Structures are given as C-alpha cells and as structure tokens.
Image (cartoon, rainbow, N blue to C red):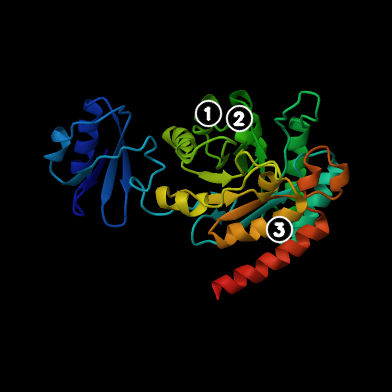
Amino acid sequence: MLIVMNHNAGKKQIEAIIKAVELMGYSAAPIPGSERTAIGVLGNKGYVDDATVRALPGVKEVIHVSKPYKLVSRDFHPKNTIVKVAGLEIGAGKRPVIMAGPCAVESEEQILKTARAVKASGADMLRGGAFKPRTGPHTFQGMREEGLKLLSLASRDSGLPFVTEVMSPDTVGLVAEYADMLQVGARNMQNFELLKELGKIKKPILLKRGMCASIEEFLAAAEYILAEGNPGVILCERGIRTFETATRNTLDLAVIPLIKELSHLPVMIDPSHATGKRSLVPPMAKAALVAGADGLMLEVHPEPEKALSDGPQSLTLPGFEKLMREIDRMISFIEG
C-alpha cells in the first residue's frame, strides 16, 4: 500500500501517518518527492484495510500495490534512481557505463595489463572475479582475498573503480573492504541471506538475473536488498537458459524497456555471459545500448586462449578497443 500525502502536508502529519502504520503492525517507508511525500507500507502479506489512515489529516489518496516488490516498483518510487559508484553515476539519463575486465583474476601481470588497456580504450570500471562460482568443483575457483588485493592494486594503478562478485554472507565484509561495488552472480540471485546482508552495507550492488528467473523473481530479489536499507542496486541481465544451445544463454533484451516500466532501478547488460561467443558480444552490446541499457559488463582478457575461465567469450584487448570506438560513435549519433 502507498499513502500519498497532500503537497502541503506538514512534518507532524507525516509522522502521524508513520505512527499509525506502525501501530497496525507494518513498517512505514517515507518517500520524499519534489511536490509531495508518499509513505510506503511494508510487511503486509495480503490486503491492508486503509480505513485507519485514509481519514487522517494530510492524506491525499491511498494506492494498493499488489506486486511482491514494492520499494523496487515505480508505484513507490516514480523517478529513476541514479546509483553512484566511486563518483560514477549510473542510471537513466546518464551516459552508459562500461565495465570491462577478465572473468577471473589470474595474476598481477594479467590484471594490471588488462586494467591499463581497458582504461586506455575508454572503460569506466574494471571487473574481475576473485571468488568464482563454477559448475564443476575441479575448475579454477578464483584467488579469493589475494585476488581482491590484486584488483585493488589494478584499480589504484589505472584509476578505475572495480566490481567483483561476492558469494556468501560471511564474505560480504571482506569483499566490501576492497570493492567499489559488489556483484551478486546469477547462481546467487535467490541466496536470500546473502541479499539481506548486502542490504545492510553502504556499497552499491550489481544484481544479476538468475538463469531461470522470471522478471518478478528478479525484482523481488532486488527488494530484499532495498528492504534492508541499501537503495544502491543495479540490475543486470546476463541471459537466461532456454531450449536453444547455439549460444551459451538467450539474451533477453526486452527486459530493458520492460524493467524500466516496472522499476526505477538502472539496468545493465552482460552480453559476454549471455552469448558465450566472442563474435556475438559486440553486436549484442550495441543492441543493448540502443534498447536503453544504462551500461555494459564485458569480459576482456589479454590472452583469451589461455584464460582459466570463459576464454571463448572474452574480447581481446584490440577487440575491446575496436568495440569502444564503435560504441562512442553510436552514442554520439544517438545524442545528436
């Protein structure tokens, strides 16, 4: 339920509404606006009788929201959210942000070389995995804290903030010590204890869509983070699992305009994981930007043929440089 206040409602009237909601056994989330304040009612598992609050002074209208996600919904937050990452602004109306780097940190030489190269080509952020969730237990699992230290070194050297994946609630604190933004991978999208823990920190979160998740489940996962107090969530489409086997996953570009209708959160696209094929990454990256994506997450490796993970989908350094030139021309054309 959303309680919309009159434009001239005072502080005491708003506080009275919040108190009334709490007396009903629910949580109240004030949402200040440029013209009026709205108050979201959270914690209900069904219809809420609005008679108690509808007649209180200052109330303009009461809107019943049936979605399982509320804080994520445009009903609660009509304006686009801009997420700030180490000075970068990500969201609608801002220039698309490009995150680039290897799937996994493998060595100091590898991550430094990649960071310097993607920065020179125009990337805004560095990406790289220190903790790697892999399908098989015998594959490379990442360098863990040593990988975080190398990412931090490459970040300082290149001047690029970095994003890296966190896999469990007990490592949130450790990863947050190093990273500018924490990533929730597709396999952990519904790791609810992890999402709750991420909601308690102040760092922005990149939440990837699960490979079999519906849009409603995706947005509900983001709700877990916002409900704990962290509003800095960026949604990332990375392809879903379908009957098609010609590509690694099926890239669902329709989620960009659809999510922007449903939610105020920024939306990014990861065409590397979505396609699993180097040659398909550039066209799908550009298609995502045309569809309105707020940014891209691209895998780049100095020697993809020697990569310990995801080599076939990683762009070479020259390939990334070429793509960035094409993206710059395309954005300049779109911006007029």
Q: Which residue occupies the foreground of this view, 330 or 284?
A: 284
Q: Earlier in the sequence, mark 1 or mark 3?
A: 1
- Would residue 190 be visible to someone looking at this image? yes
Asked if labels 3 and 2 touch by Cβ distance under 8 angstroms, the answer is: no
Helix, strand or loop at mark 3: helix
The percent coordinates of residue 168 (x first, y second) are: 62, 26
Taking the view exactly as shown, the residue that stands out farthest to the front is 243
- CB under 8 Å between callouts 2 and 1? yes
Q: Residue shown at 46%/51% (left/top)?
A: 258
Q: What's the residue at 80%, 56% (across, down)?
A: 117
Residue receiving disc 1: 197
Residue hosting label 3: 282
* Callout 2 amino acid: Val
CA neighbours of label 3 inside 10 A, class few (<14), some (14 to 19), many (20+): many
Q: Residues within 10 Å of mark 1 (few under 14, many from 20)?
A: some
In the rendered view, does 230 fall on the left or right side of 60? right
Residue 328 picture location, percent across and down: 66, 68
| Residue 15 image position (x, y, % from top left) | 23, 38
Q: Amino acid at mark 1?
A: Glu
Picture quadrant of residue 134: top right
- Image quadrant assignment for residue 146: top right
Comparing labels 1 and 3, the label whose residue is closer to the camera: 3
Q: Amino acid at mark 3?
A: Pro
Q: Which residue is mark 2?
A: 172
Specify few, some or many for label 2: CA neighbours under 10 Å numbering under 14, 14-19, or 20 or more: some
